Image: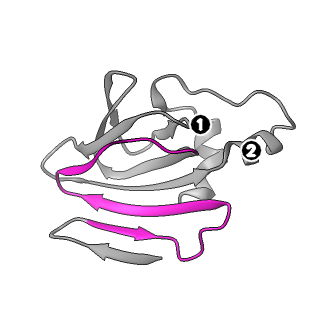
Amino acid sequence: MTNTKGNRDWVKHSAQPLKMERIEAFFGGHGFTPHRHDTYAIGRTLSGVQSFQSRKSQRHGLPGKTIVLHPDEVHDGEAGTEAGFHYRMIYIEPALIQQVLGGKPLPFIEGGLSSDPRLCAATRYLVQ
């Protein structure tokens, strides 16, 4: 992974973005302005509170929960506490997920956060 550092903030990008891109980052305050992805963004907050606006609601990613942002879903991000937040995300093309599902409809995670242990187990190796 390559590393981009600011004051306390940093972002590491995977060195070999193939069909999936992976990042790991820490932000002590404001993380990123509203934006969207063409991909699914799936990840975990490793420490702290990752607060973000999605679907016109404030969400709080905590350690132990899986974050799933759907393609074209506008979202932002910032630290929910003064301690900042550390997280990992992967960005996966919807076609890859549909291929794994055998052509079944793409999944939808209401609210962008899940405590489902099956999803946690299925994504564990992607975000560690």
Highlighted range, magenta: 10-38
Q: Position of residue 75 (x, y in %)?
A: 37, 36
Q: Residues within 10 Å of mark 2 (few under 14, many from 20)?
A: few
The nearer-to-camera label among 1 and 2 is 2
Q: Does 68 sit above or below residue 6?
A: above
Identify the residue at horizontal 45%, vertical 48% (top origin): 44
The type of residue carrying mark 1 is Pro
Q: Is residue 57 left or right of residue 19?
A: left
- Residue 50 visible here: no
Mark 1 to mark 2: distance in Å? 24 Å
Q: Position of residue 68 (x, y in %)?
A: 52, 38
Among the two numbered marks 1 and 2 on one chain, the one whose residue lies closer to the N terminus: 2
8 or 71: nearer the eye? 71
Identify the residue at horizontal 53%, vertical 62% (top origin): 22
Identify the residue at horizontal 18%, vertical 56% (top origin): 28
Count of number-bearing discs: 2
Q: Does 19 sit above or below residue 97?
A: below
Q: Position of residue 16 (x, y in %)?
A: 60, 75
For disc 2, the marked residue is 95
Identify the residue at horizontal 52%, vertical 22% (top origin): 110
Task: Reply yes or no: does residue 1 show up in magenta.
Answer: no
Q: Secondary structure at mark 2?
A: helix
Q: Is residue 35 left or right of residue 26?
A: right
Q: Quadrant of residue 88?
A: bottom left
69 or 37: nearer the eye? 37
Which mark is drawn over residue 23? Answer: none
Q: Main secondary structure of the magenta part?
A: strand
Which mark is drawn over residue 117? Answer: 1
